[in-house]
Image (spheres, grey):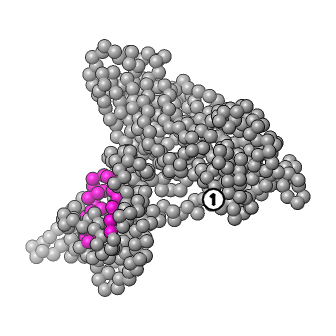
């Protein structure tokens, strides 16, 4: 069947004729004869594009239905559902399309604010008449979106839609080359004037829970629209995949072989007898049960090992029995294994709220917060830990430093058996400016001093404080009195078993480039262009000209603004990075904000 397409709302042409329409809106070889009837030569180009352009990306379609299905599946934006639920007539829908087109053209995230006591009185951001003017003069979608809906009856449940709006939270777009934006508490959705709903500040998931500015950049990001319900829709599937991934013994061997990791926990549990002796201990995410075994050995009166992976829960049970510490009718030990997520623990075992003396967990992921397991640990703290009970570790600290050429693949490609293949290295470097890299960075490859980025007190922090925006200033390494290129930043973390709870033997687990490597390595974020840096002492008195951060005018420091937040993809995180170079005379140069998804 030949596809039907529309040009300016009235011209239909067949699948064969589609080939004559070009990307820029011209009609190619299509010529009008004296009678005004078009004619042209046929071409065998099956890759030509139609004139229905996606609202959020550069995809073209042969019909409105295909376009809207693409928007629903690819970008999470269900145009027909929104029209029905919000009772949008033709003109309101017309305005909505222009509103979205205008926001995408501006390269800005956007959200809506609804204040209504009656749904009929709701005024949406696109109600203004200015959105009756097409953003594109030849936008075929504007004249075709309602062709097949004129005779449809509109079913509408007012109470259901109001409930959906309360859950909706936000519509937002992450677009390529997002500019700098900020959010305030006024940007929170207020339903019926009395209920704040935390909004996604962009569709990469960066969240804002305070009045602080949030810098975002969707460079090379696929535009998406999402609402609160879509964020939660696949959580169960993601959890199944996540816990299933820990069924691999290879992962556990890697973690157990990480001496820095395992011995830090061992020392905290075995070398603090006043904390563990006679205590009730909960191990969240026990895996093989190694931390629970340490706790049992340290003299705990009860150890509850919580594991969401069915396979690993069985493995931990078998290991506990083999080591004669399991607690059941046949074994007189202290360790019990609960196959459950900690949020559903009371469905699996009998345990009273606030009955745990010590809560222990190895929850850290890459860049500390990847996997988002910290939220589960905080839930366990608030639900099961006694007031004043111990949480191990009890602090976590993130650090940042700038890295140089040695931490990239450039040196390798510059000399491959005597041949220059640096073009490959440069291409790889460009790609890494879009994606975070987990790798071991050596101290010698750092070109700045480290700086503290963020600290967490796990005993007192609130769950929403997992998402944060912080600043740090990087100063070039003084020992290197020369100009060097900073190609990006490296993030790492330390967790502390402090003397607040570990009074006999406090210890620190560090993933720093200055200490032996761990399986976490470090997280590398590459700048889109390297920044030339030099110590202020080397630049003092110089009258340098040129753009700050170049070889002619190196920066004496780099000011960073970093946001880390849980992404809309469950258990992933988004990192936004903004760099500002400062000269020795206080002049500044800003670089575009970058977004990385881990």
Q: Is residue 127 above or below residue 527?
A: below
Toward the left, the furthest residue is 34
Say if 563 sits above or below 337 in the image.
above
Q: Is residue 65 visible?
A: no
Residue 331 lies in quadrant: bottom right
Q: Quadrant of residue 15?
A: bottom left
Number of other residues with Cα within 10 Å of mark 1, as a class: few under 14, some 14 to 19, many 20 or more? few
- The spot of residue 184 in percent (x, y) is 35, 50
Q: Is residue 114 magenta?
A: yes
* Relative image position of residue 191 (x, y in whole percent): 37, 65
Identify which residue, 152 or 508, lies in the foreground.
Answer: 508
Q: Which residue is mark 1?
A: 343
What is the magenta segment's predominant secondary structure?
helix
Residue 25: image location, x then y, percent: 23, 62
Q: Could you tell me residue 50's position as x and y percent?
A: 30, 66
Q: Residue at x 58, y 31 (%)?
A: 512
Of 270 and 193, the residue lying toward us: 193
Compared across the picture, whether 571 is left or right of 321 comes to left
In the image, which residues are magenta?
A: 92-116
> Please, which residue is most extreme toward the right here?
330
Question: Residue 402 vs residue 214: left or right?
Answer: right
């Amino acid at each position: 069947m030949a596809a039907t397409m529309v040009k300016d709302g009235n011209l239909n042409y067949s699948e064969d004729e589609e080939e004559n329409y070009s990307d820029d809106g011209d009609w190619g070889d299509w010529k009008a004869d004296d009678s005004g009837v078009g004619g042209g030569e046929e071409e065998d180009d099956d890759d030509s594009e139609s004139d229905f352009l996606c609202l959020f990306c550069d995809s073209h379609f042969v019909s409105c239905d295909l376009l809207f299905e693409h928007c629903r599946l690819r970008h999470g934006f269900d145009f027909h559902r929104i029209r029905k639920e919000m009772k949008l007539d033709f003109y309101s829908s017309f305005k909505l399309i222009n509103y979205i087109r205008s926001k995408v053209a501006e390269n800005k995230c956007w959200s809506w604010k609804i204040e209504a006591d009656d749904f009929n009185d709701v005024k949406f951001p696109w109600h203004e008449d200015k959105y009756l003017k097409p953003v594109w003069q030849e936008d075929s979608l504007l004249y075709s979106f309602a062709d097949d809906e004129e005779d449809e009856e509109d079913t509408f449940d007012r109470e259901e839609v109001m409930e959906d709006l309360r859950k909706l939270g936000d519509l937002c777009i992450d677009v390529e080359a997002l500019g700098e934006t900020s959010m305030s508490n006024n940007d929170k959705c207020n339903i019926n004037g009395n209920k704040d709903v935390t909004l996604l500040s962009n569709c990469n998931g960066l969240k804002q829970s305070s009045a602080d500015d949030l810098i975002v950049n969707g460079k090379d990001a696929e535009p998406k629209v999402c609402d609160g319900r879509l964020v939660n829709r696949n959580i169960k599937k993601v959890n199944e995949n996540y816990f299933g991934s820990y069924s691999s013994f290879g992962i556990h061997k890697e973690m157990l072989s990480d001496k820095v990791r395992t011995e830090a926990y061992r020392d905290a549990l075995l070398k603090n007898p006043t904390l563990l002796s006679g205590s009730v201990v909960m191990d969240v995410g026990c895996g093989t049960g190694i931390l629970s075994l340490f706790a049992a050995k340290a003299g705990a009166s009860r150890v509850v090992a919580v594991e969401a992976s069915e396979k690993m829960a069985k493995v931990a049970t078998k290991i506990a029995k083999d080591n004669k510490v399991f607690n059941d009718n046949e074994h007189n030990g202290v360790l019990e294994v609960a196959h459950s997520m900690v949020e559903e623990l009371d469905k699996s075992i009998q345990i009273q709220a606030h009955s745990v003396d010590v809560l222990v967990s190895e929850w850290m992921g890459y860049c500390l917060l990847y996997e988002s397991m910290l939220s589960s640990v905080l839930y366990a703290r608030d639900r099961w830990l006694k007031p004043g009970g111990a949480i191990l570790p009890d602090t976590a600290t993130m650090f940042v430093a700038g890295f140089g050429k040695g931490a990239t693949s450039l040196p390798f490609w510059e000399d491959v058996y005597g041949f220059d293949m640096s073009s490959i290295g440069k291409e790889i470097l460009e790609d890494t400016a879009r994606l975070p890299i987990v790798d071991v960075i050596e101290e010698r490859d750092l070109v700045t001093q480290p700086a503290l980025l963020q600290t967490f007190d796990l005993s007192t922090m609130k769950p929403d404080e997992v998402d944060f925006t912080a600043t740090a200033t990087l100063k070039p390494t003084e020992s290197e009195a020369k100009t060097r290129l900073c190609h990006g930043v490296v993030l790492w973390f330390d967790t502390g078993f402090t003397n607040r709870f570990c009074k006999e033997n406090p210890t620190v687990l560090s993933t720093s480039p200055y200490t032996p490597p761990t399986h976490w390595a470090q997280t590398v974020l590459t700048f889109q262009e390297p920044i030339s840096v030099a110590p202020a002492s080397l630049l003092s008195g110089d009258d340098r000209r040129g753009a700050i951060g170049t070889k002619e005018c190196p920066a004496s420091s780099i000011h960073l603004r970093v946001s880390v937040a849980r992404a809309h993809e469950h258990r992933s995180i988004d990192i936004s990075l903004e760099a500002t170079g400062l000269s020795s005379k206080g002049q500044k140069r800003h670089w575009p904000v970058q977004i990385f998804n881990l």
